[in-house]
Image (spheres, grey):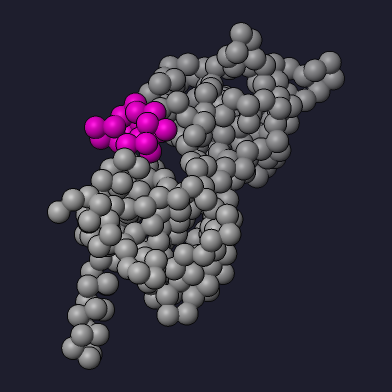
Amino acid sequence: MTEKTEKAQQRDESGTYEAIVVGGGAAGLSAALVLGRARRRTLVVDAGEPRNAPAAHMQGYLTRDGMPPAEFLAAGRAEIARYGVELVRDRAVDVTRDDGFGVTLAGGATVRARHLVVATGLRDELPPVDGVAERFGRDVLHCPYCHGWEVRDRAFGVLATSPLSVHQALMVTQWSKDVTFFLHRVAEDELSDEDLRRLAAARVRVVPGEVAGLAVTDDRLTGVRLAGAGGGTVHDREVLFVAPRAVPQTDLLVRLGAEMRETPFGTFPVVDERGLTSVPGLWAAGNASGFAEQVVNAASRGYRAGAAINGELLFADLDATVGV
């Protein structure tokens, strides 16, 4: 059978798909790969805005450690194309549900499917400190598991965005013993006695006062500047860790009435172990389903959802045939 014939078999005359995946990152492409290999009519809607775009490389993904994110996604798109999965560069702006799902795209088209996977991820909202956004993904970092090895043993700073930032300050001491914790807008009395004891045990220096900006020399971070008269004190630092505010991209899930849950890191859908939400046929994968999904985890969640959808479609069609 030729590739052209295979693709023709995968699409019915109405143009309706068996599954639409919104989001072309690791989770979405992984779900699409499984569905394509299962010979399911599948469409990926990709707005082309990956969360890890600022990073030069991704780490911690076995056999892909150090691979540039753009190269990883390009390889994934090539793989799903081999199995007849279609990909459209567009944004899903609305969604409806009746006997299936209708997805309206920014370009004006509406596509339909029996199952819908939302893999739209997170958006990082950085604190409004001069220089942080410009250097994010370079020497302003958020995850020591993603970047700690590459910057090991340098002079670290950690910018507090909430009292929970103590955890980040303690974690990064595994990669450097020279760590300064800048409280920024967090008052010292907001830290617990246990926090202070642990910071002292880890020999993390605690610096009160608001951070005004970063010092940069020859396009590299050289210090963290506090607010104050005459420009404020500058603390020499080579790397700054910061915890962005995670903004889940879950609008489509909310519009469809999926049950949501509040977490310390944002509002996420309630899903089962496969990624199925409270709405039949509606799935969430990757960082659209939870905060702590690294690339390797997101790919795994997408794989699990794709396999589960194939099973759901198979047994629904069999039951319909026998009149169950």
What range is drawn magenta here? 59-75
Which residue is found at the position 57% from the left and 54% from the top?
A: 107
Query: Is residue 195 shown left or right of residue 299?
Result: right
Seen in the picture, residue 54 relative to 222 is either above or below; the reply is below
Looking at this rendering, what residue extends furthest in the bottom direction? 323
Query: Is residue 7 shown left or right of residue 291?
Result: left
Is residue 147 in the magenta section?
A: no
Which residue is found at the position 60% from the left and 13% from the top?
A: 219
Q: Which image quarter: residue 176? A: top left
In percent of width and height, residue 228 lies at 81, 23
Q: Which image quarter: residue 99? A: bottom left
Which residue is found at the position 47% from the left and 16% from the top?
A: 154
For the N terminus, the image quarter is: bottom left
Seen in the picture, residue 36 relative to 183 is either above or below; the reply is below
In percent of width and height, residue 34 lies at 25, 55
Which residue is found at the position 34% from the left and 26% from the top?
A: 66
Query: Is residue 270 shown left or right of residue 225?
Result: left
Is residue 151 something that shows in the picture? yes
Looking at this rendering, what residue extends furthest in the top direction? 218
Out of 143 and 227, give the one closest to the viewer: 143
Is residue 283 something that shows in the picture? no
For the C terminus, the image quarter is: bottom left
